[in-house]
Amino acid sequence: MADMTLQDLYPGQAARVIGLQGGSAGYRQRLLAMGLTPGTCFTITRVAPLGDPLELHVRGCSLTIRRSEASIIAVEVLSP
């Protein structure tokens, strides 16, 4: 499958973080601190009515992230 990012996913989809691509070093560090490290599995819980932000279920917690910021997170979709 072509390179996918977190912003390409829909509610209910599960995925695994492959890595971070682009973005400032400070923002990448913040994502890592929030638990979005390579190899981490998560599920898209919901998307706001206008498509932004996204809510994720990661490591037993809910995390909200803007779609534009999600574009730097490379993911691999997990099969159902």
Image (spheres, rainbow, N blue to C red):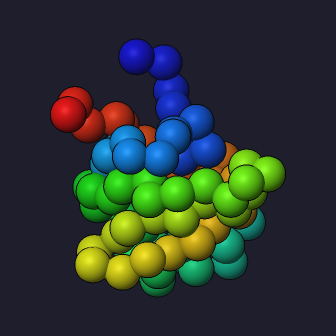
Q: How many marks?
A: 0
Question: Furthest-left residue in view?
Answer: 80
Q: In this view, does 73 lie to the left or right of 38?
A: right
- Quarter of image, res 31: bottom right
Q: Is residue 9 left or right of residue 27?
A: left
- Quarter of image, res 41: bottom left
Question: What residue lies at 63% left-to-right and 67% top-to-bottom?
Answer: 65
Residue 73 drawn above or below residue 64 = above
Inspect this view and state whether residue 44 appears.
Answer: yes
Q: In this view, does 74 lie to the left or right of 57?
A: right
Q: Position of residue 18 (x, y in %)?
A: 38, 46
Q: Is residue 8 left or right of residue 42?
A: right
Q: Where is residue 23 in the image (x, y as percent from the top left)?
A: 71, 58
Inspect this view and state whether residue 20 appears.
Answer: no
Residue 37 drawn above or below residue 72 = below
Camera-nearest residue between 67 and 23: 67
Q: Where is residue 39 in the image (x, y as percent from the top left)?
A: 26, 55
Question: Furthest-top residue in view?
Answer: 1
Question: Furthest-right residue in view?
Answer: 50
Residue 56 drawn above or below residue 60 = above
From the image, which quarter does the C terminus lie in?
A: top left
Question: What residue lies at 61% left-to-right and 44% top-to-bottom?
Answer: 7
From the image, which quarter does the N terminus lie in?
A: top left
Question: What residue lies at 46% left-to-right and 83% top-to-bottom?
Answer: 33
Question: What residue lies at 38% left-to-right and 42% top-to-bottom?
Answer: 13
